[in-house]
Image (cartoon, rainbow, N blue to C red):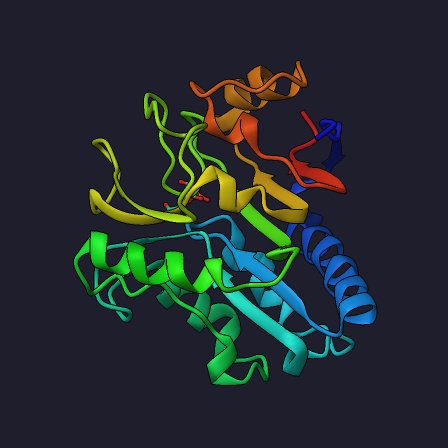
Amino acid sequence: MTMVPRIVHRLETAQFATAAAAVLRTLMREAIASDGECRIVLAGGRTPAAVYEVLCTLADIEWSRVQLFIGDERCVPPHHADSNFAMIERTLVSRAAIPPDQVHRMRGELDAAVAAAEYDRIVAALPEPRFHVVLNGVGADGHTASLFPGDTSITSEQRWSVAAQAPAPFAVPQRVTLSLRALNATRHSVALCTGDDKRTVRRMILCTEEGTPSLPASLLRGSEQTIWCVDPD
Ligand code: 6PG
């Protein structure tokens, strides 16, 4: 597969959430128009929250035609303060008219291996393309979802979802995550990477099209587009 060069949107901080939501809206409407539905993976962490709050206010997204998935989850119950799904529910699911059976969360309350096997079956059953849009966060160490530097299985893992271990100091070590194979089984890959603490990793990743397992986020690719929404630095 030819590597799709990254498209970098440098967005002013004040407009970041609105501009990133507009990028997602366009891709979601495109998928619904062409395939009748949009299968989208949402990211956890803090950065996407403001984007979701804008996204769910955009009236021209047919939420009844959206299938919602998640990139990774911390092994906590769904309403726990550290739950990625809790954040997504608060900022988007509770406000957008997505039919509940089209919201596919990772069950962080289960044993990580059990929850990962369950989600692996869900993703394995999806038609091609498995996802139309995958939204990813990026950590200052270059991790994405719960794929952390030093994990030697990142590029060889064939399962769609696996149990993972977050190194200190990350909250909740036990994790469930989509594999790199799953994160890249998408037409459009979108990464959000803002903040001064991520300036160095942003430069290391965006200065070359080559990816490296030591910076898992550098390996993110879509089959049609690889979009990075970053600060204007
Ligand atoms: C998680 C996330 C993780 C996140 C990055 C960036 O479970 O923590 O999925 O991969 O996207 O750590 O997080 P921030 O947006 O909070 O900087």
Give the camera-side residue of 41 and 114: 114
Question: Is residue 81 shown left or right of residue 105?
Answer: left
Residue at 58% x, 34% y is 220
Residue 164 in picture, x, y percent from top left = 27, 41
Give the camera-side residue of 130 and 210: 130
Question: Is residue 208 shown left or right of residue 184?
Answer: right
Q: Which residue lies furthest to the left in this view?
A: 111
- The part of the image, by quadrant, that contains residue 40 is bottom right
Q: Where is the N terminus found, in terms of image quarters?
A: top right
- The part of the image, by quadrant, that contains residue 127 is bottom right
Question: Is residue 202 shown left or right of residue 15?
Answer: left
Give the camera-side residue of 44 and 105: 105
Looking at the image, is 181 positioned above or below residue 108? Answer: above
Residue at 74% x, 62% y is 25
Camera sees residue 11 = no
Residue 46 in picture, x, y percent from top left = 44, 50
